[in-house]
Amino acid sequence: MQDFKTLEGATAIFQSLNALGQENNIFLLRRDTQHEISGNAMAAGAAAGMAAVVGIGFARGKDTSSTATVLDDGADSLLVNATESGMYFIALKRTSGITLAGFTSVDKMELVPNQCQFVSYAQMNKFVVKNFSFIQKKIQKVYITYDNDMTMFLIGRTVEKELPYHEANFAKFVAKFKK
């Protein structure tokens, strides 16, 4: 299994998928399960994915004609490479164990084979990056809305202890998109 726990390993994975740009910013985003639980009734059918646009996100939207998604099989997170022209997403799935407070340990995640998707910034209408709550500032909500009104509901922790490159790279992403 390919190792995404080091920056060199993660970069090699994106390179093997031809998913590198001139500028690369690699970090981890997780499914916002709290949003899915508190969301509207459409969550049951479409909360797990961006089948129409991205094919690998955790999303809901007005277009419910296609609710099947490659993440319906239980992917928990996305390894992200934010480049100068858009974002590459690779699905990650929990291999074993339980989740604590909604978070699976990175050590218990593996890449989902052949699950890489690129979405250009031109396809993204809106980015929302903000504190998870007024108390919890170590977790950021990341909501990305696309042209077809689909929205990916994700969260990112400011620190991922098992990913030494995550903290600095996620901070760059947050600085770019947080309002």
Image: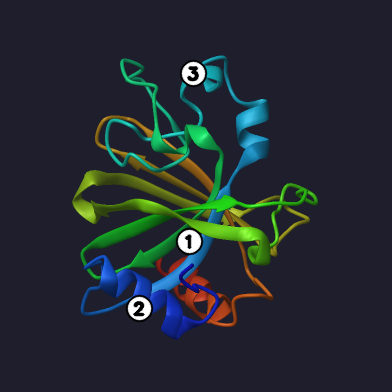
* Foreground tag (3 vs 1): 3
Asked whether the beta carbons under mark 3 and mark 1 sit within 8 Å of each other, the answer is no
The quadrant holding residue 138 is bottom right
Q: Position of residue 132 (x, y in %)?
A: 66, 51
| Residue found 47% across the figure and 39% down from its top | 58
Disc on the earlier residue, 1 or 2? 2
Q: Amino acid at mark 3?
A: Gly
Q: Amino acid at mark 1?
A: Lys
- Residue 37 shown left or right of residue 7 in the figure: right
The outermost residue toward the bottom is 8
| 53 is higher (above) or lower (below) than 128 | above
Residue 74 relative to residue 101: left or right: left
Q: Nearer the viewer, residue 76 or 168?
A: 76
Inter-mark Cα distance, 3 to 1: 29 Å
Above or below, 42 relative to 3:
above
Identity, as a three-letter code, of the amino acid under mark 2: Ala
The spot of residue 20 in percent (x, y) is 25, 72
The alpha-carbon separation of the residues under discs 1 and 2 comes to: 28 Å
Q: Which mark is residue 45?
A: 3
* Distance Cα–Cα, label 3 vs label 2: 35 Å
The residue drawn where x is 46% and y is 38% is: 71
Which is more foreground, mark 1 or mark 2? Answer: 2
Residue 17 horizontal/vertical position (percent): 26, 65
| Residue highlighted by disc 2 | 12
**Residue 166's x, y, as percent?**
54, 75
Which of the numbered marks, if any, corresponds to residue 178? Answer: 1
